[in-house]
Structures are given as C-alpha cells and as structure tokens.
Image (cartoon, rainbow, N blue to C red):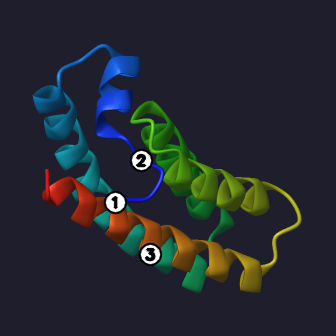
C-alpha cells in the first residue's frame, strides 16, 4: 500500500513485525464486520451508529499507524457529527472500503 511502512509502524509501536501482523489480522477481521454495519447505518441514515463505527475505525487505524484509513474514518466521523451530507458520506465509505482492501492485500503479502 502506497505510503504505508510496516517496519516504521512497528518501530513507532515498539513491537515486532510478527506481533504487529497478528494485531492487524484481528483488526482486518473486525473491520470487515464494521464495513457491513457502516453500510447498513448509512443506508438507514443511522447517524449514531455511523458516528460510533467511524470513531472506532479512526482510532483503530491511528493506533496501527495506518494513516490513510484513519484519516478517511476521521472525515466520516466529523461529517456524521456535524453538517451531515449523505452523498459525501457515501463517497467516504467507498474511499474507506477501497483503501481497506488495498491495505488488506498489502498485509496478506507480508
């Protein structure tokens, strides 16, 4: 994934690559479930769930040093708490899903 460095993330977190990859594997499993719930929240205009899920994703990926995923989730979280625009939320969810799939493929190759 462009702009993402596993070793840099490991160094920042002071953990081995093996431990990092185990943590990321769990995050990927959870995110797959979260994406389903995020889409359902979006489709039903459930802003409370949209905010809660995007907030969790923002924090999870910030902790993993996956900045792009964290930033997209942060934008979605901010949008769900403020001037909500459904079309922009849909774009952000799509961007997050695409970046997540790229991240997942990148990690699977490790």
Residue lying at 20% horizontally and 45% vertically, measured from the top left: 26
- Horizontally, residue 71 falls left or right of residue 38, namely right
Distance from label 3 to label 2 (Cα)? 15 Å
Q: On the image, which quarter does residue 11 sit in? A: top left
- Neighbour tally class for label 1: few under 14, some 14-19, many 20 plus, Cα within 10 Å: some
Q: Are discs 3 and 1 less than 8 Å apart at CB?
A: no
Return the disc, 3 or 2, that comes first in the chain's sequence. Answer: 2
Q: Position of residue 73 (x, y in %)?
A: 58, 56
Distance from label 3 to label 1 (Cα)? 9 Å
Return the disc, 1 or 2, that comes first in the chain's sequence. Answer: 2
- For the residue pair 99 and 76, the one nearer the viewer reads as 99
Identify the secondary structure beneath mark 3. helix
Residue lying at 26% horizontally and 55% vertically, measured from the top left: 28
- Horizontally, residue 87 falls left or right of residue 36, namely right
- The residue that label 2 is drawn on is 4
- Horizontally, residue 85 falls left or right of residue 98, namely right
- The residue that label 3 is drawn on is 98
Q: Are discs 1 and 2 less than 8 Å apart at CB?
A: yes
- The residue that label 1 is drawn on is 103
Q: Is residue 5 above or below residue 104?
A: above
Q: Is residue 7 above or below residue 100?
A: above
- For the residue pair 82 and 10, the one nearer the viewer reads as 10
Quarter of the image that includes the N terminus: bottom left
Residue lying at 17% horizontally and 21% vertically, measured from the top left: 16
Front position among marks 3 and 2? 2
Q: Position of residue 84 (x, y in %)?
A: 82, 70
Q: Position of residue 66 (x, y in %)?
A: 45, 44
Identify the secondary structure beneath mark 2. loop
Identify the secondary structure beneath mark 1. helix
Q: Is residue 76 above or below residue 58?
A: below
Distance from label 1 to label 2 (Cα)? 9 Å
């Amino acid at each position: 994934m462009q702009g993402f460095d596993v070793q840099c993330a490991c160094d920042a977190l002071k953990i081995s690559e093996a431990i990092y990859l185990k943590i990321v594997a769990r995050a990927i499993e959870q995110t797959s479930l979260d994406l389903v719930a995020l889409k359902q929240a979006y489709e039903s205009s459930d802003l409370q769930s949209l905010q809660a899920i995007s907030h969790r994703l923002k924090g999870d990926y910030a902790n993993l040093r996956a900045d792009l995923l964290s930033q997209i989730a942060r934008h979605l979280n901010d949008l769900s708490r403020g001037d909500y625009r459904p079309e922009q939320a849909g774009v952000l969810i799509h961007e997050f899903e695409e970046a997540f799939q790229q991240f997942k493929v990148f990690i699977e190759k490790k």
